[in-house]
Image (tube, helix red, strand yellow):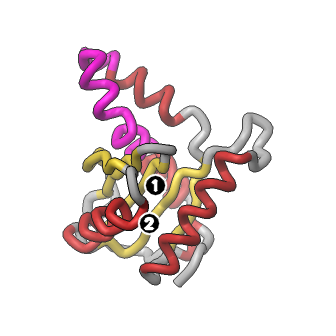
Amino acid sequence: MAVVDLFDLPREGVLLGIDPGTTTIGVAATDRIRMMASPVETILKKKLAPALERLFQVYDQREAVGLIVGLPLNVDGSMGPRAQSVRTLVSSLLKVRDLPVAFQDERYSSAEAGDVLRAAGASRRHREAGIDAAAAAIILQDALSRLEQRP
């Protein structure tokens, strides 16, 4: 496949969401009926190939049908260097594996994830360890909310 519009993803099946950072990739997944998104894991991205290999393992294990990638737009909605870096990552990913990928605006998802983990009483160490996967779950849940308005 390639990069598609969110509404062009398969209508049924598990979706995987990622929060791509500079050193990690937060991963989340929906349930089969797409009621909710849950954090799965955080993948260290020391080298891209092993990180993508792990991402594809999770994708296959969960029998996912599409990938939603958080796109860090600027406050005004424009694309800056971080968003371009994510687009480059997706380009690399699609060279290795052909699958449907859609972007989801991820502004403030990490801050929101930190607030959620803090409110849940997670220690600072646990917040730091889980924030990327929690942010991926927020990104994915936002995409699910948009999909509910599918025409």
| Label 1 neighbour load within 10 Å: few <14, some 14-19, many 20+ | some
The residue located at (62%, 70%) in the rendering is 5
Horizontal arrangement in the rendering, residue 91 relative to residue 126 (left or right): right
Q: Quadrant of residue 16?
A: bottom left
Residue 81: percent from the left, percent from the top? 71, 47
The residue located at (42%, 80%) in the rendering is 97
Helix, strand or loop: magenta stretch: helix
Residue where numbered disc 1 is placed: 144
Which callout, 1 or 2, points at the residue further toward the start of the chain? Answer: 2
Residue 72: percent from the left, percent from the top? 62, 45
Horizontal arrangement in the rendering, residue 69 relative to residue 26 (left or right): right
Quadrant containing the C terminus in the rendered view? bottom right
Q: Give the range drawn in magenta.
A: 118-138
Residue 102: percent from the left, percent from the top? 55, 66
Q: In which quarter of the image is residue 108?
A: top right
- Taking the view exactly as shown, the residue that stands out farthest to the left is 61
From where the camera sits, is residue 37 visible? no
| Label 2 neighbour load within 10 Å: few <14, some 14-19, many 20+ | many
Horizontal arrangement in the rendering, residue 64 relative to residue 20 (left or right): left
Q: Is residue 62 above or below residue 142?
A: below
- 112 or 82, nearer to the observer: 82
Judged from the image, the secondary structure of the residue bearing numbered disc 2 is strand
As measured in the structure, the alpha-carbon distance from the residue carrying label 1 to the one carrying label 2 is: 12 Å
- 112 or 91, nearer to the observer: 91
Q: In this view, does 94 lie above or below 119?
A: below
Queried whether the magenta region covers residue 136, the answer comes back as yes
Residue where numbered disc 2 is placed: 67
Callout 1 amino acid: Leu
The residue located at (76%, 44%) in the rendering is 77
Residue 29: percent from the left, percent from the top? 31, 56
